Image (cartoon, rainbow, N blue to C red):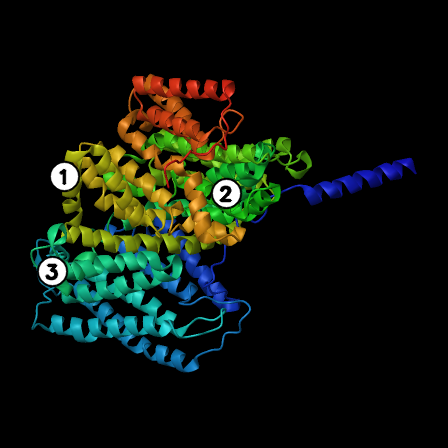
Amino acid sequence: MAEQANNNEITDSAALEDKTTVLAEGVDEEPIEGNRRLFTGNGYLFIAALSTLYAAFHMIALNGLSISDWTGVEIPFLPQFPMETWNFRIIHIAGALALGFLLFSAHSFHPDKEHKGTSILSWISLVLAIPALTAGATAVGFSNTISSGTLPQMGGLTTWAAFPGTDIYQAEVRWFGIPLLIATFGAILLGWFERRGRELFAASDIVLAICGVVVAIYLVAIYGTAARNSVGTPFVPIGVAFAATAGAAMILELTRRVAGLALVIITGVFLLYTFTAHLLPGILAVQSAYSWQRFFGHVYSDAGILGPTTAVSSTYIILFIIFAAFLQASKVGDYFVNFAFAAAGRARGGPAKVAIFASGLMGMINGTSAGNVVATGSLTIPLMKKVGYHKKTAGAIEAAASTGGQIMPPIMGAGAFIMAEITGIPYQEIAIAAIIPAILYFASIYFMVDFEAAKLNMRGMREDELPKFAKLIRQIYLFIPIIILIFALFLGYSVIRAGTLATVAAAVVSWLTPHRMGLRSILKAFELAGVMSIQIITVCACAGIIVGVISLTGVGARFSAVLLDLAGVSQLLALFFAMCIAILLGMGMPTTAAYAVAASVVAPGLIQLGIPQLTAHFFVFYFAVVSAITPPVALASYAAAGISGANPIETSVASFKIGIAAFIVPFMFFYNSAILMEGSWLEVIRSGITATFGVFLLSSGVQGWFMGSRPAWFLRVGLILAALFMIEGGWLSDLVGIGAAVGIFFIQKIFQPDPDAAIPVRGAD
């Protein structure tokens, strides 16, 4: 009987432990957007196959594999690898457009509302397939004509004489351009009003998917001729302008569906500027107006949509999305969050520190700030509220922590890859340079969270609420794919090869877990990667439109001249102005697009001031990242507010306060380049230690908690000033900052001024 009682007691305690222990589950599951279609049956199989093929195509292309090389069998329409660069990027965008329009509806689905079909609009949309297919047939005809060898050659290239009055010109206008624009704009317009069940394809979306493929067929054919050399000039074939207009319109519409209106509006402003710049005064003016044909003949080239942003999204970004999908399939994200709970959950305000730790880890495999918030915040935000944090603060902490994942080496979201592409600096150097800035960012968030917990006398989580650390340590091998990635990068492997090795390692390591990746799981991971990639690819293409405007109009160079004039007054003023522009350009935009645009507008001006290239781009990149927590448009804060139930604006203001130290860090790059690993090891170590101490003092001053008690208002001001001295980076300024901090400490301990003392105001009457 005693033995039975003991057994019952053990069973009860085990059940209680299972009930109370916090275990992360489903962190790796991709959130379902409100406008994503949920197909079943054959519809699901078609989309799953399309997504899998799209992601696998990139993995194969990037590693230079070719079926015809293996088998000796030539398969029609199968691309040969390595592909010509422009063709690869055109197909990359076309695949994302086709997949994106089929998956993401033009409107949101409300689960509690029954959607009534609009059959008349669906039939009208289907009629638009006729001009779309007409344009497609014409594009295929052009391709066959070019490949037939009947056209004249010039310099080894086939000529494409699409001059006004020629038969080719007439065909491009009547049978390709006009039908394509009718189908594209008609389907976009009808898509806003057409309603179909969530599990069904919309006719207008099918037409848009066809149009995306038609644009690719035409551009691949024409850019293989001598006509490619006329891109960006008034002599570009009019068909290119038609294809680019349709392509740009589809990119803008898909961006609206997957990333919201902010980036679309900003792009619209730039497009409006292009055609009105000759009417504007001052630095915004251009000498002569740009025609529709010249601009759109320029924008779908490597100076615009096919430029650096798409170059990166078609290589590094999609490769690391595939890597992230493999990690998600093997449930590594759940392990990361559980590991963070076990390591940091016992500290005061435990869940908030878990959010910092987990977001840093998840940021290594997650490409967006808002995505990171959704992945980890669904678990950490409710627990923060449970231990005493206000719902506004809980959301703000998660938003600030998740935003930091974008600057966490080795993957650093996607912006770092664009930095490597634009600057030519090896990615390995950028990742090394990011180490101390990432430490400073997360240290500042940690101090702010810790001081808030101390002020409110919060507890940590109980032992029985946390996963067992000893058990998680035995699963430390789940970090192996990331360790392999880091080692491969620093052994000199290319980013493509290092990412591929890490992806293979993720599949191999999964066999040590209950979530073993067989053929079905690997195909599922590719399917997940195809779906996950749509947003970032579309956003990069949309940012490419802005880059195209900047490169054609030269507005970036004129902005650089303004920065030079400001620097004549004060370099600090020029940097502050550059910060404001970078944040404004980034508001409401995903980090990748925010950095790509700011790098085109702001970074060249900073470089002309004499600031080193790496420092200038890191300055811009950092502010593009923190724009996600900068009110009034703060995407990460809004996502966190949706989970916490707090007011979005209040949450964004609170996240701005929590991340305030992060707004000072980029100025450290300018005054102290050792923070970016430039200089001797002694300088780097000293700069890292003093900057961390400066961040500590700044957090103390902002939060109002210093060395175990609340300081008076004038001591808080002193702490902030001491922090600024520490941030400046010189020996003398460091000594002044340390001396001030020591003096404040003794004043607080000896004189104990009242922390609630008010500033006396006399003479008001």
Residue type pointed to by label 2: Ala
Q: Is residue 36 above or below residue 376?
A: below
Structural distance between the alpha carbons of marks 3 and 2: 58 Å
Q: Earlier along the polypeptide chain: callout 3 or callout 1?
A: 3
Which residue carries the number 3 mark? Answer: 279
Residue type pointed to by label 3: Leu
Instruction: Report helix, strand or loop for mark 2.
Output: helix
**Residue in front for this viewpoint, 288 or 61:** 288
Q: Nearer the viewer, mark 2 or mark 1?
A: 1
Q: Looking at the rendered structure, which numbered label has been put on residue 507?
A: 2
Which of the 4 image quarters holds residue 461?
A: top right
Which residue carries the number 1 mark? Answer: 565
Point out the image quarter for the N terminus.
top right
Structural distance between the alpha carbons of marks 2 and 1: 55 Å
Left/right placement of residue 298 relative to residue 26 reads left
Q: Earlier along the polypeptide chain: callout 3 or callout 2?
A: 3
Q: Which residue is at 26% across, 62% downward? A: 248
Residue 276 visible in the displayed image = yes
| Residue 359 percent across, percent down from the top left | 48, 40
| Residue 668 percent across, percent down from the top left | 31, 30
**Residue in front for this viewpoint, 540 or 114:** 114
**Residue in front for this viewpoint, 287 or 179:** 287
